[in-house]
Image: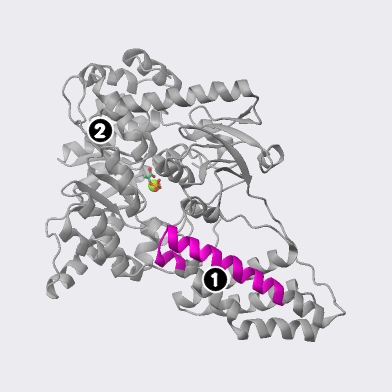
Amino acid sequence: MLSGIGISPGIVLAKAKVKKEHNIEIIRESIKDINAEIDRFHEAIECSKKQIKEVRDKTLAEIGEKEARIFDAHELILEDVTFTDQVINKIKDCLINSESAIKEVSNNFIAIFNNMDDAYMKEKASDIKDVSERVIYNLLGIEQCDFNSMTEEVIVVSKDLTPSDTASFNKDKVLGFITEFGGKTSHTAILARTLEIPAVTGINDLLQKIEDDDFLIIDGNSGQVIVNPDNEVIKEYEKKKSEYEKQLLVYKKYKDKKTISKDGINVELVANIGMPSDIKGVLNNGAEGIGLFRTEFLFMDRDRLPTEEEQFQAYKEVVQKMGDKPVVIRTIDIGGDKEVPYLCLPAEMNPFLGYRAIRMCLDRQDMFRTQLRALLRASNYGNLKIMFPMISNIDEIQEAKKILEEIRVDLRNNGILFNENIEIGMMIEIPSAAIMSDIFAKEVDFFSIGSNDLIQYTVAVDRGNDKIASLYDEFNPAVLRLINTIIENAHNEGIWVGMCGEAASNTELIPILLAMGLDEFSMNASSLLQARYLISQLSVNDIKQELPQILQMQKGKQIQKYISKITNIRK
Ligand code: PEP
Ligand code: MG
């Protein structure tokens, strides 16, 4: 049995599909037979075209036309004689192997396109990189792992997965995944919960322990992984799986109920989403709205910036599908662990402390203004609220509001309709904003506490680093005091306050948040019903009386123990 961190609940049994790591070093070899080498190159091109066509057709059938177009662009590169002729000439002139010829020619093109001050050309550079890697892999006979075109049910095993790998999973075939790296609040983990697939992370030397076609059991609740179990263990886990599914049926009964505590305190229970297609799961799980739409996912897993119209359609679709329910849409939070390759941003030493979210938006106002226009236009179709992420000082929120106001004026002048009374909020996810929340509360209509980042910045623990995961503690008294301060400051100014980080769905923390007076809890759709069930069992006023004592405690563990004693919550 292997033990890791359960990052997405549920139990699944299936065969392993291992994503192999390739650290390929291309060696510049001299060749003697030019014609044979050119034939080799042509064969690899044909094979790559066939693969690209297959992925394209599958993407078109299962995801959409827009996504399928990425692969059209890849095919065009292979058909472009400027590219292929240069490779052939290099083979002939320098008498070198195809792999190095491709590498040298593609590096040249990549550098040229990257140096152009045009987003479209920069996108071309990343297409060329993708395609030339594919051809080189084919020349070297290396199998490529394509998450979108899996044909049988598997559990993906990988050293690491990027959020866009996870977003590209064929949901019918990838039943779960296991990785070596990544914490509970990494974006890959968040996506796994959105996709509702069990996942475990933090298993060392994973690729030495599991091979393709090993039979696996993942328990995403306990973080355990069993490799090639015997029949008895399989039976035991099949039983566990059915018990877990029975518990889910109890929660399901709360789907159309209000979120109300045993002593009648009403709170709002809403969902986090990353894509308009997540709405189905949100409505199936009885959400009262959307508390966080992470719009950066609209910018990922594609090869160019979405246009104003594309964004407008996506936001409109979400607000319309949610009817009159509130939908909080956050402006892009690119950076940190959310990479957008076609923006070609330079690597940073500390990406979570770097060029990210509102910092990038205030710098690259073209992108920001396009998004704000699309958001305001969509506000005419439902109950849309705009939220700004990663605000660390007052200038940032004032500047963001100023730009928004300029766009409002422009829309008005052009007779374009939008909601004049739209609510504007900000995330409180940086300690400086939490400490100054009394001041910030005068600037906005609502706060949403981003506990994922607030915890990592308060205790200085990278949220994705599993080696120090035990220090990343939502019960750390410093974190709880900050959250309490934010809620008090918001209420003193008469604004509402929610939480959209993963802590909002932590069943041990929910009682404390209720006692502090949190108004809105926003979480992955898969956690909603369990939270509603739990809240219905709690007497908020009883816990409130314990709050001063809880906030005086010195250790997170002590707080956890105390809260489970007074609420009878099982760990
Ligand atoms: C957070 O930090 O809690 C949050 C919700 O934002 P993200 O996870 O997207 O950084
Ligand atoms: Mg955040």
Q: Nearer the viewer, residue 5 or 239?
A: 239
176 versus 510 height, above or below: below
Quarter location, residue 127: bottom right
The residue that mark 2 highlights is 255
Q: CA distance from mark 2 to mark 1?
A: 44 Å
**Element type at mark 1:** helix
Q: Which residues are magenta?
A: 42-68
Please tell me how crowded label 2 is: few (under 14), some (14-19), or many (20+) other residues with Cα within 10 Å.
Answer: some
The residue located at (53%, 34%) in the rendering is 469
Q: Is residue 193 visible?
A: yes
- Mark found first going from the N terminus, 2 or 1: 1
The residue located at (35%, 53%) in the rendering is 275
Left or right placement of residue 385 versus residue 560 in this view: left
- Image spot of residue 271 (x, y percent): 30, 42
The residue that mark 1 highlights is 127
**Element type at mark 2:** loop
Q: Is residue 345 visible?
A: no
- Image spot of residue 562 (x, y percent): 37, 15
**Front label number (2 vs 1):** 2
Q: Which mark is residue 509?
A: none
Type of residue at label 1? Asp
Left or right placement of residue 424 versus residue 308 in this view: left
